[in-house]
Image (spheres, rainbow, N blue to C red):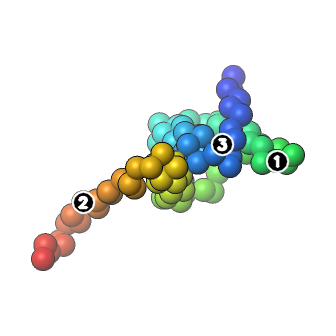
Amino acid sequence: MTATTETNWDDPCQRAAALKAAYYSRLEGGTQHRVRFRSGDNEQEVQSGHSALSLAELRREMQAAEDECRAKQGLPPLVRRRGLIAGMRRR
């Protein structure tokens, strides 16, 4: 059974929540995720199973929406740090 979530895609906070749910579902190996959103009188639905969308792209969009949501609330964007990679030199 698949849960359907209606999302106001124009609201960055709702968009971030929907993308976060899709991202973590994908990380856990979820097979089905459906997001429905409306923009004005246009309604769209995205259903993903084993889609071609990479985790990196999904994460990038999720983080962008989170930053937009924080800006809407008057908060600064989150500071995201990348870890050291084996063989990398610190300067």
Helix, strand or loop under label 3: loop
- Packing grade of label 3 (10 A; few <14, some 14-19, many >=20) is few
Question: In this orientation, which residue lies closer to the viewer: 78 or 53?
Answer: 78
What residue is shown with label 1? 40
Mark before the other along the chain sequence, 3 or 1 = 1
Amino acid type indicated by mark 1: Gly
Q: On the picture, is 79 further left or further right than 67?
A: left
Helix, strand or loop under label 1: loop
Which label was assigned to residue 83? 2
- Distance, label 3 to label 2, CA atoms, is 30 Å
**Cβ atoms at labels 2 and 1 below 8 Å apart:** no
Amino acid type indicated by mark 3: Gly
Where residue 60 sits: x, y (%)?
49, 58
**Cβ atoms at labels 3 and 2 below 8 Å apart:** no
Amino acid type indicated by mark 2: Gly
Where residue 83 sits: x, y (%)?
24, 60
Q: In the image, which is nearer the foreground, mark 3 or mark 1?
A: 1
Where residue 81 sits: x, y (%)?
28, 59
- For image coordinates 64% across by 51% down, the residue present is 51
Question: In this orientation, which residue lies closer to the viewer: 32 or 69?
Answer: 69
Mark before the other along the chain sequence, 2 or 1 = 1
- Packing grade of label 2 (10 A; few <14, some 14-19, many >=20) is few
Res. 89 image quadrant: bottom left
- For image coordinates 74% across by 39% down, the residue present is 36
What residue is shown with label 3? 49
- For image coordinates 32% across by 57% down, the residue present is 79
**Picture quarter with the C terminus:** bottom left
In this view of the protein, can residue 71 be seen by the observer?
yes
- For image coordinates 60% across by 56% down, the residue present is 53
- Distance, label 2 to label 1, CA atoms, is 41 Å
Helix, strand or loop under label 2: loop
